[in-house]
Image (cartoon, rainbow, N blue to C red):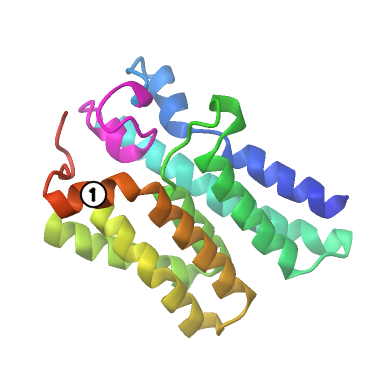
Amino acid sequence: MSALLLIVVAYLLGSLSFAVIVSRAMGLPDPRSFGSGNPGATNVLRTGRKSAAVLTLLGDAFKGWLAVVLARALAPQFGLGEDVVLLAALAVFVGHLFPVFFRFQGGKGVATALGVLVGLSPWLGLACLATWLVTALLFRISSLSALTAAVLAPVYAALLTGWGKTTLAVLVIALLLVYRHKSNLVKLVTGQEARIGARK
């Protein structure tokens, strides 16, 4: 039961959509109603309020990190191992994708995935962040940067931790992230994907 409780708390934490919360607090349009319709930092940026986009990014990343750190801190007290930490990592990410508080209409998970990866291993998170930044600087396309980092994340995890359960959890997160970007893949192929900072 204690393991289930940690997993449920992680999911509920992930269900806090900071794009919607920050937009409401700052009097901005619901990010699900314009642009890509995605409640994430990139779409919030299309309002022209960089501060709102930054707060969204930090909030979504922080909740991913917090869920992993809390699970790792509390698991030993309940006699639980690293497996429950990995399940909490998956739960907070799934919570962001399908938030119970927002009719299961969540974001694509880039910032939350980064927070989770940093929580699992700071070096893993930094490697993925560096990959995103380099790709973004070269191409200025957020989705391409996210997809590149997602594809390489399991490789980085394997190099850092070996082909174990952590790498498997990272692989599941990467596959879910790629799946959530399926519409972006079509736009990338057809050359219609918007660049970072562009308004729709």
Q: Is residue 174 left or right of residue 68?
A: left
Q: Secondary structure at mark 1?
A: helix
Pick whichever, 44 or 25, lies toward us: 44
Q: Position of residue 70 (x, y in %)?
A: 69, 53
- Categorize mark 1 by other alpha carbons within 10 Å: few (<14), some (14-19), many (20+): few
Task: Please say if 32 is above or below 185.
Answer: above
Q: Residue at x 25, y 29 (%)?
A: 35
Q: Which residue is mark 1?
A: 186
Q: Residue at x 42, y 18 (%)?
A: 24
- Amino acid marked by disc 1: Val
Pick whichever, 194 or 89, lies toward us: 194
Q: Residue at x 54, y 31 (%)?
A: 104
Q: Is residue 27 magenta?
A: no
Task: Please say if 24 is above or below 83.
Answer: above
Q: Is residue 39 magenta?
A: yes
**Over which residues does the magenta segment extend?**
32-49
Q: Position of residue 11 (x, y in %)?
A: 65, 43
If the image is split into quadrants, where does the C terminus sit? Answer: top left
Q: Is residue 130 left or right of residue 94?
A: left
Q: Position of residue 39 (x, y in %)?
A: 39, 33
Query: Number of numbered discs present?
Result: 1
Q: Is residue 2 left or right of residue 9?
A: right
Q: Residue at x 20, y 46 (%)?
A: 187
Quarter of the image where one finds residue 149: bottom left
Q: Main secondary structure of the magenta part?
A: loop
Q: Is residue 99 left or right of residue 189?
A: right
Task: Please say if 155 is above or below 37.
Answer: below
Q: Position of residue 55 (x, y in %)?
A: 39, 36
